[in-house]
Image: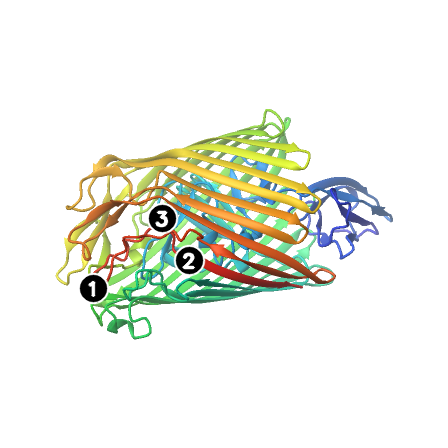
Amino acid sequence: MAQYDAHLTGHVLDEQTGEHLAFVNVQLKGTNIGTVTDESGHYFLKDLPIGRQTIVFSFVGYETLELPILIEEDKTKELKAVIREVSQQLNSVVVTANRYATKRQETATIVNVLSPKLFETTAVACVADALCFQPGLRVENTCSNCGKTELRINGLQGQYTQILMDSRPVFSSMAAVYGLEQVPSAMIDRIEVVRGGGSAMYGANAIAGVVNIITKEPVRNFVNISNTSHINEDAGYDIHTDLNASVMSENRKIGAYLFASHRTRSAYDRDNDGFSELPKLRATTAGTRLFFKTSAYSKITAEYHHTTDYRRGGNRLDDEPHTADIAEQLRHNIDAGSLSFDWFSEDNRHFVSAYSAIQHIGRESYFGAGRDTAAYGRSKDLTSNTGLQYRFSYLCGRMNGDLTIGAEYNYNGLHDRMLGYQRDITQKVHVVGVYAQNEWKNTHWSVLLGARLEKHNLLPKPVCTPRATFRYTPVNGLVLRAGYSSGYRAPQAYDEDLHVAAVGGNVSLITLDPNLKPEYSHSATLSIDWYRQFDALEVNLTAEGFYTYLQDVFFLREDGKDAAGNVLFTRTNARGAWVGGLNLEGKLNYQKRDFNFQLSMGYTYQQSRYIEPLQWSADVPAQKRMLHTPDNYAYLLFDIQPVHDFTISINGKATGSMLVPHLAGFIAQDEQTETPTFWELGIRLAYDIHLYKHYCLENSGGVKNILDQYQRDIDKGEFRDANYIYGPTMPRTYFLGLALKL
């Protein structure tokens, strides 16, 4: 790029207060040229390309502002920006919907964003704890011994959701077993959630939706240290400590974000029978994200993190696992990293991205009962993703066009051994995919057509998954959307196969039907999204209808016991199933000088049914209703700042009645149980003490599960069913937090 003696200076003000804003991002659109405002709210950009340019001002909690300006040679221009404080969720820039940055209101697919503010106000330690505060999403603990969590989107099991790290699908079947609890909130910039089929862009398993965990990247020099300590009424504890730091070179061409997190949690035994309802846990994560701007139009980004995770449940938790009546013990060592190179042309019409990501998991495990010395196992899992993406932006009549094409290669190699149970799974998955999509859009219309063609080595023929979405904005603030997508799941080992639960003094084992066929899906969505600004009050109301049909749906069938007494399950095909329902969401955001509040509520009504009645056990009647899928669930988030630096946050989750399986052991024979409705309520108080300049000490405290909602019919003793667990994972719990922001 040619260098010109052309500079830009200015300052950024808050629209409401008129105060100068520090650390606002100031970026020359379509380039890597940028800076942040200093502590006085001023900025300076030098050696800018001449001609008509656009300057983008962005800041967390404020509306992104774009201002045009003519940059001239041998001149220094001045540009003042006044930005308005709004709800970040309503005006976010997202990447998951189309694989490139787009304003949320302009996407043809609804994208929900979980921000760092949500992590703070709910005092969550990991991804799993935060995801339930979105419509259509529900997270539940499915094992009382190891604390396995499962994310369900629009009523479908966790295996139907594609989880991404920085837009890369490196969350394998093994990673998905405990992975959502192994990603600490300290390393997360935001989480983007797309409900509905995403296979056209992200491949297999993206039937229910896509969850994109986006890690933090450096923006300025700072250090944050925080600790949150939880204690329940039984003196159980959960303590997590986080360290975040960002370092930037003076010319802002090189930057590094450093993060570290440590969590330790004691086991919890609700009924005092000596067997855990929640395992003890020790987890540590450390890593970094780096970038190097090779020019004004190109950048290299690298990320690496290492996680160690230890969890132990059952009884006799301090002894060797084979001396316990029931024990599930796991040690994970996880290494993950990514590398990408991004380039875009000076006219901002061409964009190329080459990327590669990898994740390796080493696991030592014990899943056993009855003091079995043969229940030890070792597992290794390697997942990689390599791809190339090109985007071309053009003008088509009165509409802007974006053509995106790409190619990806995904690999997963799994080796899971439990020789004492004659279990030795070796699986290699190779998937080659190409995709293309074209979006035409203007202020009022958006049409997106796309498809992905994949060759999966476990399927005889390539699979094509098309996608079509439509957006119509008749007036400013009203958005109508409709979409169709298809997807598939290959007949391979999924996460529940890699989790072995204790049942009735033995263990449960899952095998695949040798004639298992792939599962195909067809999904449709229809939504209305309404935005309105009333002076200081911002309103957003969303209604989304969804329907998914599953062909040759996977079904888990009990097939008795083997010679050793282990409970056997087989994954086979049923004729089909459907999931349909309605997501409702409402948001209010009021900003008036020192007083503000935000209210967010979501409700989901759904039905998840098999086409024909199915029977998972000979002891229970056949029925169409899917297990572990309530027809109703909801959430509530309310934040109010009555005075400057003091915030009150209230959160709640409601889970309606659902049908869950209960295997024989503690009870005489298999049963199906209709669970009660649960309502969790929490509160957090926070006060900021300003120490020096922008240095801040945040003090917080509160209560989770105020009403002490918990399952009442827990199995007792060594013959219990470890999977018979539902409802809130923790009892009434008190917490204190301290965060130093430098």
Q: Tell me which numbered mark, 3 or 1, is placed earlier along the sequence.
A: 3
Which part of the image, by quadrant, shows the C terminus? bottom right
Residue type beneath disc 3: Gln
Q: Specify the quadrant of the image occupied by residue 188.
A: bottom right
Question: x, y (%) of residue 661?
Answer: 25, 48
Element marked by disc 1: loop
Which residue has dot 3 on it? Answer: 159
Which residue, as the protein is rendered here, is positioned at the far right? 74
Cβ atoms at labels 3 and 1 below 8 Å apart: no
Element marked by disc 2: helix
- Alpha carbons under labels 1 and 2: distance apart: 26 Å
- Vertical order, 738 against 140 (above or below): below
Q: In this rendering, which labeled residue sits more in front, label 3 or label 1?
A: 3
Tell me, yes or no, if residue 214 can be seen here: no
Residue type beneath disc 2: Gly
Q: Tell me which numbered mark, 1 or 2, is placed earlier along the sequence.
A: 2
Which residue has dot 2 on it? Answer: 179
- Vertical order, 379 against 168 (above or below): below
- Vertical order, 400 against 346 (above or below): above
50 or 112, which lies in front?
112
- Alpha carbons under labels 3 and 1: distance apart: 25 Å
Q: Left or right: 162 with respect to 536?
A: left
Residue type beneath disc 1: Gln
Question: x, y (%) of residue 293?
Answer: 66, 57
Which residue, as the protein is rendered here, is positioned at the far top? 474
The crowding category of the residue bearing disc 3, from other C-alpha atoms within 10 Å (few below 14, some 14 to 19, many at least 20), is: many
- Alpha carbons under labels 3 and 2: distance apart: 13 Å
350 or 54, which lies in front?
54
